[in-house]
Image (cartoon, rainbow, N blue to C red):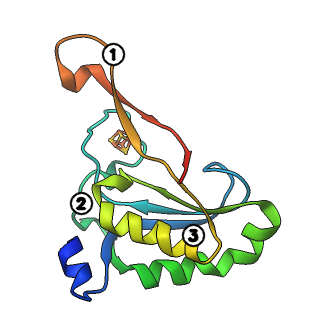
């Protein structure tokens, strides 16, 4: 489903597991941005506001499906729709999640493609932080730091 760098070199189109795309965000970097929420996170924070992003697999709950396999081309087609707004607001594309670095090849290609088109890019990786204690599941929390990439 999510292909490897070797497959990419062999000409297989890069695919990733996307939770959702959010347009016109003003909270994930400068200006108006399209946020690409990627599925998959190594942490299990009890307070997670997007628990549907934890698993790397497609999930369903009732009538709702969480997760879509998308190619880089498909994501970029959505991101490109707001180029004019990025230009006027200083915005661009932000990768978030979940943990975008769980899908390194997909994330790297998205960032490279956006940058190649002159679209500003940022990434919101999660950084596990040890806060003391002996139980790692209780003593870790995440810091999501926006980084221009
Ligand atoms: S790091 Fe963020 S996305 Fe991952 S489980 Fe914790 S709150 Fe949820």
> Ligand 1 appears in which quadrant?
top left
Looking at the image, which residue is at 76% across and 76% down?
84
- Identify the residue under disc 1: 131
Mark before the other along the chain sequence, 2 or 3: 2
The part of the image, by quadrant, that contains residue 87 is: bottom right
The part of the image, by quadrant, that contains residue 119 is: bottom right
Q: Which mark is residue 115?
A: 3
Residue 126 coordinates in the image, percent (x, y): 39, 41
Q: CA distance from mark 1 to mark 3?
A: 36 Å
Residue 145 coordinates in the image, percent (x, y): 51, 39
Q: CA distance from mark 2 to mark 3?
A: 26 Å
Rate crowding at label 2 as few (under 14), some (14 to 19) or many (20 or more) other CA atoms within 10 Å.
many
Tell me the SS state at disc 3: helix
Q: Nearer the viewer, residue 62 or 6?
A: 6
- Identify the residue under disc 2: 56
The part of the image, by quadrant, that contains residue 74 is: bottom left
Q: Look at discs 2 and 3 and give the one toward the viewer.
A: 3
Is 133 above or below relative to 33? above
Q: Which mark is residue 36?
A: none
The total number of labels drawn is 3
């Amino acid at each position: 489903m999510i292909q490897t760098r070797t497959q990419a070199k062999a000409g297989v189109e890069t695919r990733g597991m996307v939770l959702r795309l959010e347009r016109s965000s003003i909270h994930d970097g400068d200006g108006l941005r399209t946020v690409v929420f990627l599925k998959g996170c190594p942490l299990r924070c009890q307070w997670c506001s997007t628990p549907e992003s934890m698993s790397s697999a497609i999930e369903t709950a009732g009538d709702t499906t969480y997760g879509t396999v998308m190619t880089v081309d498909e994501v970029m087609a959505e991101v490109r729709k707001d180029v004019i707004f990025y230009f006027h607001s200083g915005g661009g594309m932000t990768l978030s999640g979940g943990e975008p670095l769980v899908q390194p090849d997909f994330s790297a290609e998205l960032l490279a493609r956006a940058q190649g088109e002159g679209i500003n890019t940022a990434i919101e990786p999660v950084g596990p932080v040890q806060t003391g204690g002996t139980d790692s599941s209780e003593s870790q929390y995440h810091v999501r730091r926006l980084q221009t990439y």
